[in-house]
Image (cartoon, rainbow, N blue to C red):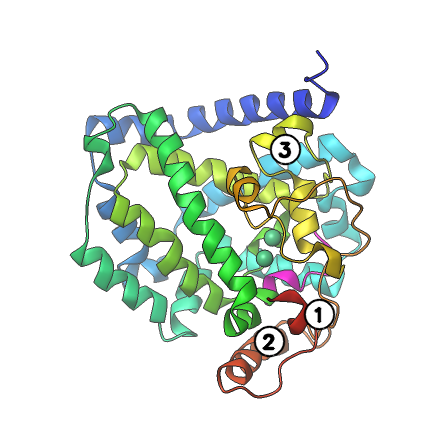
Amino acid sequence: MSLLKKNSLRFALTLIGATAIFTVHFWEQLHNAYENPETLHAFVSKRYHNLMDLMDFNWKHLFTDLFTVSIALTIETIWVGWDHCSLKKLLHLRSKSLNSDLFFFVLAITNSFKFLSVVLTFGIGYLAFGIVSDSVQFNMGEFIPWPWLQFIVVSLYSELIAYWIHRFAHSVKWWWMVHRFHHSANEMGTLTYYRVHFIEDQLNTFFKVIPFIVFGMPLESYVIYYFITELHNLLIHSEIKSDWGWFGRYVLVSPMAHRIHHSADAMHYNYNFSNFLTIWDRLMGTFKENTVVEKVGLTDNPYNQKGIFSDLWTTYKDLMGAIFERKIPTDDADQHR
Ligand SMILES: [Zn+2]
Ligand SMILES: [Zn+2]
């Protein structure tokens, strides 16, 4: 019983409950995938490979995202109480930082984010993705017939890729200029997950989705993976601030671990790069726990002052500065190695 600390038990019950709700909600989609197998390639192509699709407003997309966010906000409210939850802050105490999170959330649920991301970056990642996904395809599903085993293998594999992508985002100068927009949130809440600059979205489209194409994965495993990681990502940005006991130490990244990653304190830099499984941070020696986070954000934060459009431009400007070796913000020197 000592293993089952209160936090771990609460989280385990949360996970079981959320998985059950997801399975019920997406049962038809999963069932169709079994009945009428469609490759991941076709599914992802629909999402990323047709510019016209990106412009389509899709009610199903809107409700799916709202549904996921509602679950995350509900879990957070039950966990921390009304006075400390993101929902109350969004309704009553909105800061400039939270307004930015809200802005990206609205873009995401109205299906405008992907379209703007392509338009405002000349679709660099999108085009590269199209070229690679057209020429490379395997299908892991042929070798691993059991969906849950596929899910575990794909999680480990894609998490390893995501770990290194995130590590590079902190260590490569120009990449950090883009990624620091996500870190510019002065306060974290469930919706902070959506705060991603368009340029980073293009990089993610290429680097994080390509592994699924190259490795191949049946649609049903991808759907499960996508929704579980989506919900989990919302929770680790929430106000929950729990380390989830042994579960957060050895299985899934806890909100506390990700808060440490967002810390403005230099002693917390370059830890907890994983967003889902803790295994790769543990194996690479970058896992950190048991520490107090006084303040999240950047030490020298140019964001959240002049409004969202100025913030979006700042990232373009800093990226160009880093590429052409002009002056870069001071805290960059501490954040990347
Ligand atoms: Zn980061
Ligand atoms: Zn984050």
Per the image, is 257 magenta? Answer: no
Q: Amino acid at mark 2?
A: Phe
Q: From which residue to which does the magenta span run?
A: 181-188
Q: Which residue is mark 1?
A: 304
Per the image, is 182 magenta? Answer: yes
Q: Position of residue 305 (x, y in %)?
A: 73, 74
Under circle 1, the secondary element is loop
Circle 1 residues within 10 Å: few <14, some 14–19, many ≥20: some
Which is more toward the observer, 55 or 333?
333
Which is more toward the observer, 145 or 74?
145
Q: Quadrant of the C terminus?
A: bottom right
Q: Quadrant of the N terminus?
A: top right
Q: Is residue 307 visible?
A: yes
Q: Position of residue 102 (x, y in %)?
A: 63, 57
Please identify, in this view, whether the residue under mark 1 or under mark 2 is nearer the observer. 1
Q: Name the residue located 49 percent from the left edge and 22 percent from the top edge.
A: 20
Circle 3 residues within 10 Å: few <14, some 14–19, many ≥20: many
Q: Which residue is mark 3?
A: 248
Q: Image quadrant of residue 129?
A: bottom left
Under circle 3, the secondary element is helix
Q: Name the residue located 62 percent from the left edge and 86 percent from the top edge.
A: 327
Which badge, 1 or 2, comes first in the chain's sequence?
A: 1
Q: Is residue 264 visible?
A: no
On residue 309, which mark appears? Answer: 2
Tally of marks: 3
Please identify, in this view, whether the residue under mark 3 or under mark 2 is nearer the observer. 3
Which is more toward the observer, 53 or 210?
210
Q: Position of residue 117 (x, y in %)?
A: 43, 67
